[in-house]
Image: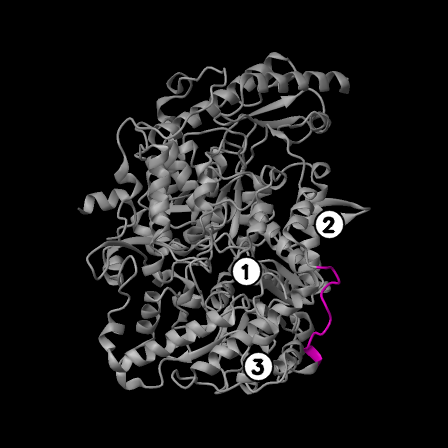
């Protein structure tokens, strides 16, 4: 037998005997014989731990120094995140359906919700969504359910993968989408928005910050959206919210996005963790699990999944969403990160990241190989236009161990630098760019 | 008394739990760069705690949880099998963890091969032709799969198919997923034998039907023996068959959904392929399809062309269903699991079925087995045979917790009012099963001799039964509201 299968042949025989069966095959006599599968899936021998370790050591990608964010941000991660999140009590447990033996999971969900509410300024958060892109799609569906209007306006400066995901969900649900242009002077086209908001719409979804790294004030847009009877949805980075204005304070009704920047590794795109928060008025329209406080029959403060009459296992086809498994363990990691950095640290990381990106920005401008297309304020990322072909520059940077900025078109690129990068690291990168540029010429 | 602190309650002004590296770059003054209206005016009220505070807090919090390594976890439909350690180790490598999802293919070849190999192995297990690993969970796989079904009909210009057939025994996610895509759900009743009622199915089949969603074995643990007839009927009216892979574990080494006539399916890597459930995710719900639907799988796709793996983002597809490539590190764990078994993968289903039948047979004289049939990897009791005690399924579940065993799934499926759904999985030894059997029989006895002890259970867990009505009537959903409430 196999190391994960404890049965001895004597035990199998004894168990079969108690079922009055002679062989394992007798368990399957009721299956139509045409569908019975008798082949082995593979002829490969089972691998030992050591063999798996060796195989995996050969199966990874090339680790580069990332000067690219675009929705996936490299930050330093305290060692305690993995030490805690790998405890079997957190790692191997199921969804907390038996709260008497799942208070651990429920409590950190409550803490996660509290952190999301604190950062967004909104009243209520759920237990997590799959990722940022799907959180935006769910926010859109939620707005459609709240308003009963199957049309949504989407800012075209959102990350492309977020827009693509929204488009897919919208198409199959029969929701119409109008994209609001991002103009060459670095802002949303307010005239177009004014025009398109004359026809009823459920919500306007904006980016905070946007794909170019720009952080904008949505006060005017908020007024227009609310005057039209629609909801404002902010797709916001949680780390950014430690220093920039909370979406609640500029009138967002729903806030959603990615919490990856809170201590989740790049991981080739997943698992990450999405979040979704809203105002009290819409709590019963929210997708996903929500944890609340209650008392047990011994009078102890306890935690339990609540408001479940929104969910698939109770409401079936009338549920707000089909989501059940979400990204609980990643929400735990984000929670540990947020509380370890805490009130002052999260802001320090944000400030250091802004400082690093600005330093990189200044050094790149100094090379005279880059110009700045937008004058707006940027946060963690800066968009620059390179004088040469950006794809070729990036390919040469890979050879030097760097992941260059995210290319957008022939010359445009979005750079990111994290708080953990030293001045030397950034200077070396800028030098590498100069060298690569000389090679290209 | 259980550990009773929230991390916010450990906060002491001025305490910190971090050191940021000195980088040699001057820190900017935000107020000099950004206008006031962009800046947050007050710091977020997050805790101020030391590193040891955090570690001790979450260690104590974790001890309030039951995990697979704590004890037997016979949660029906959830396939709570052992999560091998080597798989976690594999997923923690820098070559997986520190890889940006927007890196160039040239830097990713071995990783893309792992991804593609996993998809191919899963296709083969499913009896399908192509697999996408981009879905984040089972329900997300259902949604993706139904998008493919809808796109298939759309591409054929067949716009009248607005109905989805779903048996009454189905998981709640099935109708919820169908409804998210605007389908009208048509529920069909099960026969007294717990299977799809062929006559009821025939009665609802029409050219308005897009397809049917089935779980096989179904949520009662019964194999749908008429599956080939069901497939013939549904295909006959131009519909497609969707397979909910929640119960796929029963079929490893036994049968393949593709051979039964299913066109589209999802699997749950966090069930059948042993990746940790994490207290509610991250899971992974790969979607497999027959060849004629492969072009509709979501973007981005990893494909082998001229001996190089490339990432495909254009061409026909339902589109993108999430940010990148799904829960990649979960896929890595499942790959390691598949490799750890190799040709012995075939042993899993039979032993899972043996374990379930063994437990069922030993308990059926005390617990009511509403359908006497051949069971697969799980089975459903409808409470105790002796109903006179007043002991309900909820009481039995809570009492089990006292003995260090997790409760089975309860009150599902909805076909019976006292459902207890038991799935032991193949990883449990005869000794563990015998212990569980003894406990279940002991509880049946207690129900007669000391019913109050069972009704008031659990007694030995960190918390007792919870006031769920209070939680819903007066929702306190974050710390800020909690502070206001006291």
Q: Quadrant of residue B249?
A: bottom right
**Is B371 included in the stretch rendered in magenta?**
no
Query: Which residue was labeled with disc 3?
Result: A16
Q: Do the CB atoms of the residues marked 2 and 3 lie less than 8 Å apart?
A: no
Q: Position of residue A262 (x, y in %)?
A: 45, 37
What residue range appears in magenta? Answer: A34-45
Chain of the residue under the numbered disc 2 shown in the image: B
Q: Position of residue A86 (x, y in %)?
A: 47, 47
Query: Which residue was labeled with disc 1?
Result: B143
Mark 2 neighbour density, 10 Å: few (under 14) some (14–19) many (20 or more)? some
Chain of the residue under the numbered disc 1 shown in the image: B
Query: Which residue was labeled with disc 2?
Result: B303
Q: Position of residue B460 (x, y in %)?
A: 28, 62
Q: Nearer the viewer, residue B209 or A239?
A: A239
Quadrant of the frame with the N terminus of chain A: bottom right
For the point 67% across and 35% down, the residue is A62
The reply, left or right, for residue A200 in relation to residue A251 is right
- Judged by depth in the image, the label closer to the viewer, 1 or 3, is 3
Whole-Å distance between the Cαs marked 2 and 3? Answer: 45 Å
- Judged by depth in the image, the label closer to the viewer, 2 or 1, is 2
Chain of the residue under the numbered disc 3 shown in the image: A
Whole-Å distance between the Cαs marked 1 and 3? Answer: 40 Å
Q: Quadrant of residue A2?
A: bottom right
Q: Is residue A14 above or below residue A99?
A: below
Q: Is residue A201 above or below residue A98?
A: above
Report whether residue A16 is seen.
yes
Q: Nearer the viewer, residue B340 or A193?
A: B340
For the point 36% across and 51% down, the residue is B63
Q: Nearer the viewer, residue B23 or B398?
A: B398
């Amino acid at each position: 037998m196999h190391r994960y299968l404890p049965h001895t042949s004597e035990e199998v025989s004894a168990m079969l005997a108690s079922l009055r069966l002679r062989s394992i095959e007798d368990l399957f006599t009721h299956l139509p014989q045409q569908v019975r599968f008798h082949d082995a899936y593979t002829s490969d021998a089972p691998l030992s731990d050591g063999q798996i370790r060796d195989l995996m050591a050969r199966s990874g990608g090339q680790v580069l120094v990332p000067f690219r964010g675009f929705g996936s941000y490299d930050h330093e991660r305290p060692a305690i995140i993995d030490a805690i999140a790998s405890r079997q009590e957190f790692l191997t447990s199921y969804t907390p359906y038996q709260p008497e033996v799942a208070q651990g999971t429920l409590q950190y969900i409550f803490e996660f919700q509290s952190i999301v509410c604190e950062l967004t300024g909104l009243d209520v958060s759920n237990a997590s969504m799959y990722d940022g892109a799907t959180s935006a799609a769910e926010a859109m569906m939620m707005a459609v359910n709240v308003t009963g209007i199957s049309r949504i306006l989407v800012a075209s400066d959102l990350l492309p993968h977020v827009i693509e995901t929204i488009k897919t969900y919208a198409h199959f649900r029969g929701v119409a989408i109008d994209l609001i242009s991002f103009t060459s002077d670095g802002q949303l086209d307010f005239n177009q928005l004014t025009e398109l908001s004359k026809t009823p719409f459920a919500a306007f979804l904006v980016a905070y910050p946007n794909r170019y790294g720009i952080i904008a004030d949505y006060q005017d847009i908020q007024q227009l959206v609310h005057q039209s009877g629609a909801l404002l949805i902010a797709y916001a980075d949680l780390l950014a919210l430690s220093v920039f204005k909370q979406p609640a304070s500029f009138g967002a009704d729903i806030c959603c996005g990615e919490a990856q920047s809170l201590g989740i590794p790049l991981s080739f795109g997943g698992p990450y963790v999405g979040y979704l928060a809203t105002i009290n008025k819409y709590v019963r329209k929210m997708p996903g699990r929500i944890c609340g406080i209650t008392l047990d029959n011994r009078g102890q403060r306890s935690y339990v999944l609540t408001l479940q009459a929104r969910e698939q296992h109770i409401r079936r086809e009338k549920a707000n969403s089909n989501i059940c498994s979400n990204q609980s363990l990643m929400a735990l990691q984000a929670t540990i990160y947020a509380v370890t950095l805490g009130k002052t640290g999260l802001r320090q990381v944000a400030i250091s990241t802004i400082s690093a990106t600005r330093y990189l920005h200044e050094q790149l401008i100094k090379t005279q190989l880059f110009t700045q297309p937008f004058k707006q304020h940027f946060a963690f990322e800066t968009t620059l236009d390179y004088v040469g072909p950006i794809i070729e520059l990036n390919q040469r940077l890979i050879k030097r161990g760097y992941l260059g900025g995210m290319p957008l078109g022939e010359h445009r690129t979005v750079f990111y630098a994290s708080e953990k990068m030293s001045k030397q690291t950034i200077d070396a990168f800028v030098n590498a760019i100069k060298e690569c540029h000389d090679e290209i010429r | 008394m259980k550990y009773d602190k929230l991390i916010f309650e450990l906060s002491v002004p001025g305490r910190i739990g971090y050191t940021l590296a000195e980088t040699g770059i001057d820190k900017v003054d935000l107020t000099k760069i950004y206008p006031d209206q962009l800046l947050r005016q007050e710091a977020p009220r997050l805790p101020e705690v030391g590193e040891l505070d955090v570690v001790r807090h979450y260690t104590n919090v974790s001890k309030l949880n039951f995990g697979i390594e704590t004890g037997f976890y016979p949660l029906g439909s959830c396939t709570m099998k052992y999560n091998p350690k080597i798989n976690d180790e594999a997923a923690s490598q820098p070559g997986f963890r520190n890889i940006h999802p927007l890196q160039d293919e040239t830097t990713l070849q071995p990783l893309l091969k792992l991804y593609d190999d996993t998809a191919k192995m899963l296709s083969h297990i499913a009896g399908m032709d192509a697999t996408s690993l981009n879905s984040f969970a089972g329900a997300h796989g259902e949604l993706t799969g139904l998008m493919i079904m809808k796109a298939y009909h759309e591409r054929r210009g067949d716009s009248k198919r607005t109905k989805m057939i779903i048996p009454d025994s189905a998981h709640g996610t099935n109708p919820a997923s169908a409804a998210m895509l605007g389908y009208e759900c048509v529920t069909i009743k099960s026969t007294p034998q717990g299977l799809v009622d062929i006559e009821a199915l025939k009665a609802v089949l029409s050219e308005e039907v897009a397809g049917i969603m089935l779980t096989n074995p179904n949520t009662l643990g019964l194999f749908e023996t008429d599956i080939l007839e069901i497939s013939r009927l549904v295909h006959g009216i131009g519909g497609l068959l969707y397979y909910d892979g929640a119960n796929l574990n029963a079929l490893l080494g036994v049968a393949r959904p593709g051979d039964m006539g299913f066109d589209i399916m999802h699997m749950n890597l966090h069930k059948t392929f042993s990746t940790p459930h994490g207290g509610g995710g991250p899971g992974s719900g790969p979607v497999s399809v027959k060849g004629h639907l492969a072009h509709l799988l979501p973007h981005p796709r990893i494909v082998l062309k001229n001996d190089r793996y490339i990432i495909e983002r254009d061409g026909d597809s339902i589109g993108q269903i999430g940010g990148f490539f799904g829960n990649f590190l979960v896929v890595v764990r499942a790959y390691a699991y598949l490799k750890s078994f190799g040709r012995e993968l075939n042993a899993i289903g039979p032993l899972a079925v043996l374990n379930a039948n063994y437990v069922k047979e030993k308990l059926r004289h005390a617990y009511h087995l509403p359908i006497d049939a051949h069971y697969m990897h799980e089975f459903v009791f409808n409470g105790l045979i002796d109903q006179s005690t007043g002991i309900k399924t909820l009481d039995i579940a809570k009492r089990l917790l006292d003995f260090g065993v997790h409760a089975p799934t309860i009150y599902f499926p909805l076909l019976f009012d006292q459902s207890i759904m038991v799935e032991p999985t193949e990883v449990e030894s005869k000794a563990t099963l015998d212990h569980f059997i003894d406990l279940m029989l002991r509880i049946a006895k207690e129900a007669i001799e000391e019913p109050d002890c069972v009704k008031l259970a659990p007694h030995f867990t960190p918390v007792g039964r919870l006031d769920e009505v209070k939680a819903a009537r007066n929702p306190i959903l974050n710390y800020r509201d909690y502070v206001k409430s006291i």
